[in-house]
Image: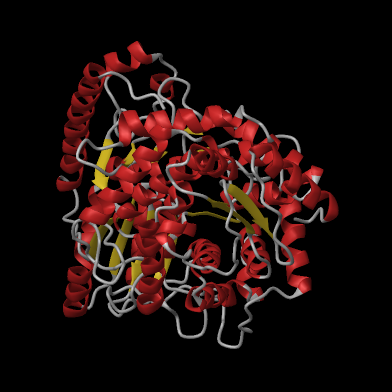
């Protein structure tokens, strides 16, 4: 991974801090000159109850171009200010700081305008930038009639709670996945182009099982999404508009960098396409140069605009020298457990599949920082140094997945303990009574948390795979409880495509590929065998290293023979291989397994 020299890094951080100070000052001036925003939802709803006024929640993203425009135009309009201050309690929250609100209102994008009654019930929800005139009319209509707008709420009270998908629902989800694919440009067939993590990963899994059509879909999407890669600094832009890949929105979110890095590594392995690692390396270089804090952890985002509210296509068209001469878009220097945990998982995945020692060191450092700075008693994690609400599912889930990825990459057992504690914490604090897991601890904030589909997909897959590593039935039960929510037809069919639900359900019904090295850690042959197992394609695998000096494996469900030299074993649901003494023998055995059972 490219790190750059010390001098350039110092210059970079100084430029970033100067830009951050300038743009933050401009943003604060715009806010202070217009509305007197509250920043605490607890305080806002207390005032709303006292004054019997609705709460106007402005859910912003600090990196978002249209949020800047909303500040400069709509919330600077004197008539809007008068209406808000005279009849509402204004509440402004950065969605990156509140994963519970971000997951609840994700469909409304950023900025999101949510008007709520003093009891927290929703009156109005609006998506994106609203011009001053329409905003005035909206506020006046709410003042005249504050009753809730009609909404088609999903009733889950009578929905079945299954820990598997019924065949008809599974087929419908697979059909939706295929129908949503853009066969010309790649990605999803929609106006915004981005790499949809679960769609690509499902295609990779099916491609590894011999589905050439899905392999072609994954290849087209991975190659097309390279257009979102910044050719100068690396890192990926959030998405492109106009139904193609050539009109990017230039903000760079750390969660997206982590998702893309991980998927491109998995794609390189599953499709045997080394070129996909070029994108992963460029993302890793961007994270190292721009987003990694000197004290530890990773920053949250880089702004879309050099000057808030002004499109910056001309800036991002410049080369390195031209950009540096004009400044740098603001970097949000908050360091959240979610973002840093996701980067740690992605870097550990890169190390597992490529042997990149720098990536592994960065992953260990990232996870170590979160463990030192954000850990809670019982195995969970705070979002920030202090949180307004929470704990949030996203932070503990991201760190649990990071710890499991580090165990896979290193076989160091303390990482498995970290992952296990994270699942236990989530189950104890965020479990919904009937099915699924809330995005935060219920009752900790005035607006109740939702059960987020993406978080529950990620949790179900992680907890299930962890159960195979640990042998602990409670981990498997967490996966099943998350899937019970996802397997409800009202949930599974709510979005255009959700192949991640199919991935989770299929994995709960099968065992992962189980590969083990038996040999001393100091033995170079054993080290080579473990590296070879790490390069095997597919995320759903159980890779372990048994050094007899360390005692039994955490889930010691197979007895291995005493041998005179290190060996690897490949196990399926039915049989374990004979000892395999070289990477070539491992590859030959797996090829034999696939020829006998192409679905593996």
The location of residue 594, given as percent across then percent down, is 79, 50
The location of residue 216, given as percent across then percent down, is 75, 39
Task: Quadrant for the N terminus, please.
Answer: top left
Question: Relative to 281, is 570 on the left or the right?
Answer: right
- Asked which quadrant contains residue 309, the reply is top left
Q: Give the vertical position of 189 relative to 480 (above or below).
A: above
Q: Foreground: 252 or 395?
A: 395
The location of residue 462, given as percent across then percent down, is 51, 62
- What residue occupies the far bottom of the structure in this picture? 158
The location of residue 361, given as percent across then percent down, is 35, 38
Residue at image location 37% in from the left, 54% down from the top: 135
Q: Foreground: 49 or 96?
A: 96
Q: Give the vertical position of 559 relative to 543 (above or below).
A: below
Q: Give the vertical position of 508 relative to 592 (above or below).
A: below
- How many dots with numbers? 0
Instruction: Give the colour scheme shown.
Output: secondary structure
- Asked which quadrant contains residue 464, the reply is bottom right
Q: Foreground: 540 or 258?
A: 540
- Residue 156 visible at all: yes
Residue at image location 60% in from the left, 66% down from the top: 558
- Residue 76 visible at all: no
Residue at image location 33% in from the left, 74% down from the top: 441
Q: Foreground: 128 or 172?
A: 172
- What residue occupies the far right of the structure in this picture? 596
- What residue occupies the far front of the structure in this picture? 564
- Asked which quadrant contains residue 55, the reply is bottom left
Task: Quadrant for the C terminus, please.
Answer: bottom right
């Amino acid at each position: 991974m490219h790190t750059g020299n010390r001098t350039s890094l110092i210059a970079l951080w100084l430029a970033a801090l100067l830009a951050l100070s300038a743009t933050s000052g401009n943003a604060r001036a715009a806010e202070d000159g217009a509305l007197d925003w509250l920043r605490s939802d607890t305080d806002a709803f207390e005032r709303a109850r006292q004054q019997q006024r609705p709460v106007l929640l402005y859910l912003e993203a600090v990196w978002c171009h249209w949020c800047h425009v909303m500040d400069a135009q709509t919330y600077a309009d004197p008539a809007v200010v008068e209406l808000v201050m005279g009849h509402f309690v204004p509440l402004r929250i950065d969605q990156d700081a509140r994963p519970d609100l971000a997951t609840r209102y994700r469909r409304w994008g950023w900025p999101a305008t949510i008007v709520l009654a003093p009891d927290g019930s929703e009156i109005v929800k609006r998506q994106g930038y609203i011009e001053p005139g329409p905003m005035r009319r909206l506020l006046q209509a709410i003042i005249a009639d504050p009753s809730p707008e009609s909404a088609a709420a999903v009733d889950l009270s009578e929905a079945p709670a299954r820990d598997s998908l019924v065949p008809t629902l599974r087929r419908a989800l697979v059909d939706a996945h295929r129908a949503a694919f853009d066969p010309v440009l790649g990605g999803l067939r929609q106006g915004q182009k981005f790499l949809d993590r679960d769609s690509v990963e499902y295609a990779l899994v099916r491609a590894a099982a011999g589905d050439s059509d899905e392999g072609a879909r994954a290849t087209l999407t991975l190659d097309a999404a390279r257009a979102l890669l910044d050719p100068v600094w690396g890192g990926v832009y959030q998405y492109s508009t106009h139904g193609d890949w050539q009109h990017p929105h230039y903000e760079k979110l750390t969660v997206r960098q982590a998702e893309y890095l991980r998927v491109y590594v998995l794609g390189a392995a599953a499709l045997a396409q080394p070129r996909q690692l070029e994108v992963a390396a460029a993302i890793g270089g961007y994270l190292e140069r721009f987003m990694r804090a000197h004290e530890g952890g990773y920053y949250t985002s880089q702004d879309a605009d050099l000057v808030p509210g002004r499109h910056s296509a001309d800036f991002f068209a410049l080369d390195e020298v031209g950009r540096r001469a004009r400044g740098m878009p603001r970097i949000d220097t908050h360091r959240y457990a979610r973002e840093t945990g996701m980067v740690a998982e992605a870097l550990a995945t890169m190390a597992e599949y490529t042997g990149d020692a720098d990536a592994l060191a960065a992953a260990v450092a990232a996870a170590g920082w979160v463990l030192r700075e954000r850990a809670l008693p019982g195995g969970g994690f705070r979002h920030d140094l202090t949180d307004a609400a929470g704990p949030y599912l996203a932070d503990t889930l991201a760190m649990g997945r990071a710890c499991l990825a580090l165990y896979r990459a290193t076989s160091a057992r303390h990482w498995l303990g970290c992952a296990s504690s994270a699942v236990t914490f989530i189950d104890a604090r965020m479990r919904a009574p009937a099915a699924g897991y809330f995005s935060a601890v219920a009752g900790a904030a005035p607006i109740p948390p939702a059960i987020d589909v993406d978080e529950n997909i990620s949790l179900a897959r992680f907890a299930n795979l962890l159960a195979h590593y640990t042998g602990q039935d409670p981990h498997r039960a967490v996966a099943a409880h998350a899937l019970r929510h996802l397997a409800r037809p009202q949930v599974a069919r709510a979005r255009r495509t959700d192949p991640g639900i199919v991935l989770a359900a299929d994995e709960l019904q099968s065992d992962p590929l189980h590969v083990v090295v038996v040999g001393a850690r100091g033995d170079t042959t054993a080290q080579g065998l473990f590296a070879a197992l790490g390069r095997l394609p597919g995320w759903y695998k159980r890779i372990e290293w048994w050094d007899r000096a360390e005692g039994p494996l955490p889930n010691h469900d197979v007895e291995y023979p005493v041998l005179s030299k290190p060996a690897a074993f490949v196990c399926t649901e039915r049989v374990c291989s004979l000892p395999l003494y070289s990477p070539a023998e491992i590859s030959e055995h797996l090829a034999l397994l696939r020829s006998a059972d192409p679905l593996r």
